[in-house]
Structures are given as structure tokens and as C-alpha cells.
Image (cartoon, grey):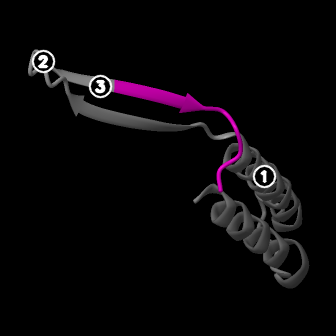
Amino acid sequence: MSIGTGVALFVIGAILAFAVHVTIGVIDLATTGYILMIAGIVVFVVGLVLLFVRRSSTSTTRVDPVSGERVTRRDIDGGPRY
């Protein structure tokens, strides 16, 4: 989700910076576009980092045959996701 948001911010910023030539007294649209482009790049990079660093966990539940008690085991894997 954050990767798509970063791309959208970048595209909107590029449109404002390069394609829109409207003068508004208070806001400079070119500067706003450049700020949105930088924010889009930052969000995109953070999204990629989170995608590759994200931890995965596995939960296994079994019933002990002697006592009838449920035993849950959780494994956390910090490796890459395949």
C-alpha cells in the first residue's frame, strides 16, 4: 500500500511541478509539486524497506495425546519472505 501511495504522490507532484502553470497568490504550485515528489520518493523507499524487512510468524497448535491439553507454538522468522 505504501509503495502505491509513494508513486501516487510522486505523480501528483510531477503534474503540479511541470504541467500546471496557474498562479495562485499564496501557494507556489511548482514548489508544492517538488515537495510532493520528494515525499513520494521517501514513502516509496520506506515501503520497499518494510516489504523486505517484514517478519513473518507461524503458529502451530496441536493437542497433547496424554493430557488432552492444547499446545501452541509460535515461530518468528526474520529472514526473507518467499
Percent of width and height locating residue 77: 60, 33
Query: How would you rate the neighbour count of disc 3 (Cα within 10 Å): few for under 14, some for 14-19, many for 20 or more?
Result: few
Q: Along the line of sight, which residue is nearer the eye, 12 or 44?
A: 44
Residue for badge 1: 39
Please identify, in this view, whether the residue under mark 1 or under mark 2 is nearer the observer. 2
Q: Along the line of sight, which residue is nearer the eye, 78 or 40?
A: 78
- Residue at 73 percent across and 47 percent down: it is 52
Counting residues from the N terminus, which is met first, the one under dot 1 or under dot 2? 1
Q: Could you tell me how far apart the alpha carbons at marks 1 and 2 are, in whole angstroms?
A: 58 Å
Which numbered disc covers residue 72? 3
Please identify, in this view, whether the residue under mark 3 or under mark 1 is nearer the observer. 3
- Residue at 79 percent across and 67 percent down: it is 10
Percent of width and height locating residue 27: 77, 59
Residue for badge 2: 66
Disc 3 marks a residue whose amino acid type is Thr
Disc 1 marks a residue whose amino acid type is Ala
Spot the residue most to the left.
68
- Residue at 88 percent across and 60 percent down: it is 34
Q: Which residues are magenta?
A: 73-82
Q: Along the line of sight, which residue is nearer the eye, 74 or 56?
A: 74
| Label 1 secondary element | helix
Percent of width and height locating residue 68: 9, 22
